[in-house]
Image (tube, rainbow, N blue to C red):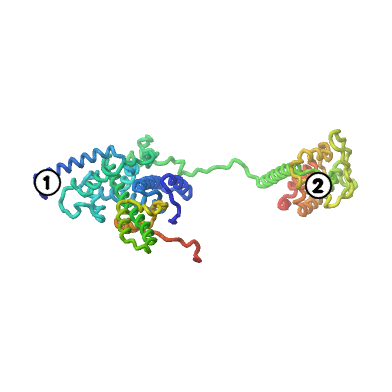
Amino acid sequence: MSHGGVESTRDTKKDEERRSSLSGRPKADDFGRSVSKIAVAQICESVGYQGCKESALEALADISIRYLCDLGKNASFHANLAGRTECNVFDITRALEDLGDSHGFPGASEVGNCLVGSGTVREIVQFVDTKEEIPFAQPVPKFPVVRNQKLIPSFEHMKETPPGKHTPSWLPAFPDPHTYNHTPMWNERGSDPCADKIEQARQRRKAERALLRLQQRLVCNGSTGTSSSTVLDAKTENIQESRSSPFLAVPLQPGEKDVSEIVLPAKLSNEPIKDDHVSLLEAYAPAIEAMKTGPSNGLDSEKMFLPEKRPAVQFKFKTGKKVLGELLDLSLQKKGERSSTFFLRDEERDDKKRRAEFILRQTTEYPMELNQS
Amino acid sequence: MNHNPQSSDGKHDDDSALSDFLASLMDYAPTIPDELVEHYLAKSGFQCPDVRLIRLVAVATQKFVAEVASDALQHCKARQAAVVKDKREKQQKVIYLCLLSFLISFGLSDPLLEQDKRLILTMDDLSKSLREYGVNVKHQEYFADSPST
C-alpha cells in the first residue's frame, strides 16, 4: 500500500473510493470496506480531525472491521461454550471484557462479579450518554444480496424413477441421454475443395473491384492522357483482338489506342485524348495532385472522369489460352513492380472490370497462379 | 460469590440499568450502520435475531474507534506543540510550556501559535495510539520504484 500524500476529508472520500474501485478488479468485500471507511471517517471527524491520510483511514477501517469480527467470534465462542447457538448480552459482555483486557477497564481485576455490572458495559453506557449521536451519512442497503439458485430438479420433480433401488427419489435427476450419448452425424453438405477455392478467389476479386471503384472515386482525374499504360494496352490489344480474329489482328504499339470516338455531352469539358507515349512522371502527376488536393474535388474528378469513360460495352472474350497466359504473366509482372501506383492511376472503370474478369478466368484455368495474386 | 441483600439490590439496579440501556439503544443511531455490523457478525458466526445486541456491538466498536482516534489526535497535537517548543527553546519559557501542555490536555490550542496547520490523521499517530491497544501497525516510509535504487 503506497502512502499517498492525499489528504481527504469525508466529502472527497467517496470520489476517491469510486476512483480506486475503477482501477483493479473488484473484490468480494469492497462494499463492506468502503462503508466502514465512511463510518470511520465520520467518527474521526467527530473526535476533532479535519482530514485524514488515505492510508491511515484505510488502516483504521480495516482494524475496526477486525474488531467487529473479533467481537462476534468471541461472543459466539462463549455462547457455544454454554451450549447455545444464539448469543445473548452476557456473551457479548464476556467478549468485550476479553478484548478490553489489554487496555484495561474498571473492575477487570475482580473475579466472580456479575456480568451485568461489568465495567465495560458501564463504559459503553457512559460513552453513549456523553457522545452526541452521529447517524451514518447514507442509507445502506441490505447486503450481501442473496440470489436464488436454480437447483437441478429431483427425480420426483421430473417424475422419473431413479435407475437403481439404492438411489432415493429426492436426489437430483440424471441428465438426459442425448447429453452424453454420441450419435453419428452425417454432413449433408458435400465439400468440394477446388470449387471452394475458386469461390474464394471470386469473392476476393469482387472485393478488389469494389475497392478499385472507391479509389477511382477518390482520386482526381487530372490529365486524361495518363490512363494509358502498358498493361492496359496489352488488355486493349486483347480487347481489339477479341472483336475480330484474335490471332490475326495487328498488335498496337504501346501508347497507342485504337479507341472509338466519344461523343461528349455539352456540359463536360472536351479534353483531347493524347495518343503519344507519356512519361512516367506525367502519368503519375494527376494522381499526385489528387492526393494533395484530397477528395474535395471528388465531383470535379468525376466530371473529368467522364470524357475518358467510354459507354459500357460488353465484350465477349473468346481468346485462346496462350494469349491470356502471356498477358497475365505480363500483367502480373507489371503488378509486382507498380502495385502501389496501380490504384492511384486513373483507370477506366470498364478496363478494370475487364482485367478483373480476365484474372478470374485465369484462376479457373490456372489454379496455381492464385498464389501470385 | 456474595449473595448479600445489598449486592442483590445492586444487581437489580444493574439489571435495570442494563435493560434500560438496551431499550435506549433502539433510539440511538450508531455511526456504524446496522447492515454492516450484521454482515460482519454473520461472517464470524454470531447469530442473534435481537436488534439491540447488534446495536450494542455497533456502539462498542464505535467507542473503540473513537478512543483510538482521540489518542491519535492527542499525539498529533503533542507533535505540533513539540514543534512550537523547538521554536521557543531559546526563550526558555518553561512556565509557558507547562501552561501550553496544560492547555493541550484540555484540547485547547496555543493562542499565540498561528494554527494554520489542520489536524490530519496520519499513519504515524495512528500506529502510536494503536500500540497501546496491542495492535502493531508498521508502515513503510517509502517504496523504491526501480531495482537500481
Residue behind mark 1: B7
Q: How many marks?
A: 2
Chain bearing tag 1 is: B
In three-dimensional space, the C-alpha distance between marks 1 and 2, rounded to whole angstroms, equals 112 Å
Residue under the point 32% across and 44% down: B37
Characterize the local packing of mark 2: few (<14), some (14-19) or many (20 or more) Cα atoms within 10 angstroms: many
A163 shown above or below B65 = above
Q: Is B21 positioned to the left or the right of B131 in the image?
A: left
For marks 1 and 2, give the one nearer the viewer.
1
> Circle 2 is placed at which residue position?
A286
| Callout 1: SS | helix
Residue A367 image position (x, y, % from top left): 72, 50
Residue nearer the viewer, A274 or A328: A274
Packing grade of label 1 (10 A; few <14, some 14-19, many >=20) is few
Q: Residue A293 sits in which quadrant?
A: top right
Residue A7 shows up from this direction: yes
Q: Are marks 1 and 2 in contact (CB under 8 Å)?
A: no
Quadrant where the N terminus of chain A lies?
Answer: bottom left
Q: Amino acid at mark 2?
A: Pro
Horizontal relation, residue A144 to residue A330: left or right: left
Q: Do discs 1 and 2 belong to a common subunit? A: no
x, y percent for residue A280: 83, 52
Name the residue nearer the viewer: A343 or A180: A343
Asked which secondary structure carries label 2, the reply is: helix
Disc ID at residue A168: none
Residue A231 percent coordinates (x, y): 82, 49
The residue sitting at the top extreme is A266
Task: Write down the chain letter for disc 2.
Answer: A
Residue closer to the observer: B103 or A350: B103
